Amino acid sequence: MSELRRDPIVGRWVIVETDHPNKPEEFEYEPYVQKGGTCPFCYGNEFMTPAEIEAFREPDTGKNTSGWQVRVVANKFPALQIEGELDRRGVGIYDISNAVGAHEILIETPYHQKDLCDLTKAEVIRNIQMWCRRALDLTKDKRLKYIMLFRNHGKAAGASLEHPHTQIVALPMVPKNVAEELRGAQGYHDYRERCIFCDMIRQEQEDRERIIEENKTFVGFCPFVSRFPFEVWIAPKKHNAYFCHMNEEEIPDLATILMDVIGKTKKVFPNVSYNFILHSAPINGDTNNDYYHWHIEFIPKLMRTAGFEWGSGFYLDPTSPELAAKYLKSAR
Amino acid sequence: MSELRRDPIVGRWVIVETDHPNKPEEFEYEPYVQKGGTCPFCYGNEFMTPAEIEAFREPDTGKNTSGWQVRVVANKFPALQIEGELDRRGVGIYDISNAVGAHEILIETPYHQKDLCDLTKAEVIRNIQMWCRRALDLTKDKRLKYIMLFRNHGKAAGASLEHPHTQIVALPMVPKNVAEELRGAQGYHDYRERCIFCDMIRQEQEDRERIIEENKTFVGFCPFVSRFPFEVWIAPKKHNAYFCHMNEEEIPDLATILMDVIGKTKKVFPNVSYNFILHSAPINGDTNNDYYHWHIEFIPKLMRTAGFEWGSGFYLDPTSPELAAKYLKSAR
């Protein structure tokens, strides 16, 4: 028999298979195989991308040339454009607006083949530093209300380019799922005067059953109400609404845990595709920083989502997070 | 430049590519190719499924034998089980419950290869009649609060068995996305004393630009705020909260429009996989029937959903619904 579990933040119910869970070998996922070919993100092809916005590079190398370690460019096919004023208007019962915002690509490494977990710790630290720099810079634009940072790794996870990259989308409004999380977290805070994420982390630290990895600053765990099998959340132990407020001592701890979580997942599921999404508080608004807690949601792409999930927001997790944590914890 | 559009029911923003939209030939979808092999849903293999719950069959043929036209069985690997009482309890900050509910499979036809649009109209009518019969029967169980009817066609859409079938999941709670829709529709009704779906249908009928198909009872259109390219909604023109309250004159009109929408989509995208989900009002509760309006959401599987959408509930539709409707309307 399975179990129904309710997410305390957004009120989502998930069916968790506790009795006859899927073991790792039972997932038929599409392994990620690189195809190669000309790559606009490789050294020497800098001219193929829109102009460089920012980079960490070797001394004495010029913009839009090789010699960079991390390079940020605008998306060649941006979903949103930075020019223009937000012009919101009605069309009968619908609302429309022009698509003001930013869509940037953070090229993580010159190495076409290297996933984040294959880089050196110093290289991953530079990437996280760049996440923070871009977020702080975009926050200066008062039209923008939310910064979404995410990574699609592999075709099955929606990546259209092979070369490792992270995307940053800055939006003129708070997206729906984030607004729901905020509402849930605020409801809890109004009632208990505590951050729900802090309470969740505390409960996970007491239970220990779902924790995969922990260091001074961060904890990585399979959430009690996982929507997807082998889903992992990485969260700072100390309350913090904005990821870009991490300090220079905390960033290396995030690099370690992020590399570990990806590395362990790929030990259990070789060449798996995955997404991770950074959830952080909205910017340039009147959000109370006391109740939101930034975190990363990491999702290996093991299943295809079916009509069930789209229709209902009701998920079926074939592997309990307790079992998933057991496999991930012991992955070598 | 693209356009941001806001769904008036749940408040979701979607980026719609209006300037450089994707044309049908630009989608690289995974075509659905049947693999064959032993099928538990084919004639002669009735013993391979759990016991028959209900069927339309030839006279003088017995339960769990061949001779059926539409056959309903329990899912062999059910997500929920009908036995037991709902036992909801807390685990620290989380809530759990045992998974009481029903998970039924409606085998649509004895023909392994035939999609709904390949059947005769009389056969599709029998299927819709069975949807209604099962829904009315499950509604008698007062523990159940929502009936979800959906169809996964093709591997890319999450179907694990090839033989055409529809799934019915009856849940002991109203799922999250439905609850949101209800809240949105109620808010509109409180304010305007009208059904938001009725207003939306009226606006579509005036605009006509997004309408693909219309008959006496139903209208099929690409919604103004489509999350997915070539998404189609089919809705009754007359206000009705529950699909199972359709009368015998309305069912044939649904059969016609459903077959047309699937058929036209497959003309534009040969062998495409798809999902459709029937949205109807919750059962056995205190829902006010005045503000919810049942409808079908039909989604061809043309893209992989990436981190972007999971993270935010913010969608990017590469083909405007106006253009999608133009292609679908003229498909022969």
Image (cartoon, coloured by chain):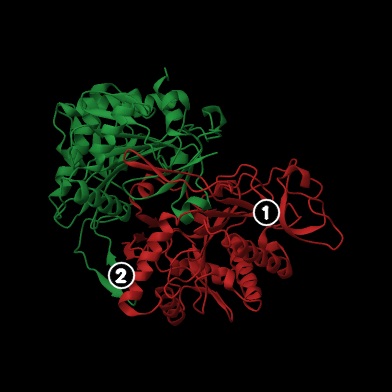
Chain colours: A green, B red
Q: In the rendered structure, which amino acid carries the disc numbered 1? A: Pro
Which three-letter amino acid code belongs to the residue tagged 2? Asp
Please indicate whether residue A15 sits to the left or right of residue B31 in the image: left
Q: Position of residue B282 (x, y in %)?
A: 48, 63
Residue projecting furthest to the top:
A332
Q: Nearer the viewer, residue B312 or B148?
A: B148
Foreground residue, B76 or A171? B76
Residue under pointer 2: A95
- Label 2 element class: strand
Q: Relative to B44, is A321 on the left or the right? A: left
Q: Residue at x 35, y 48 (%)?
A: B308
Q: CA distance from mark 1 to mark 2?
A: 39 Å
Q: Is residue A292 visible?
A: yes
- Where residue A42 appears, x then y in whole percent? 33, 33
Q: Nearer the viewer, residue B43 or A71?
A: B43
- In the picture as drawn, the residue positioned furthest to the right comes out as B60
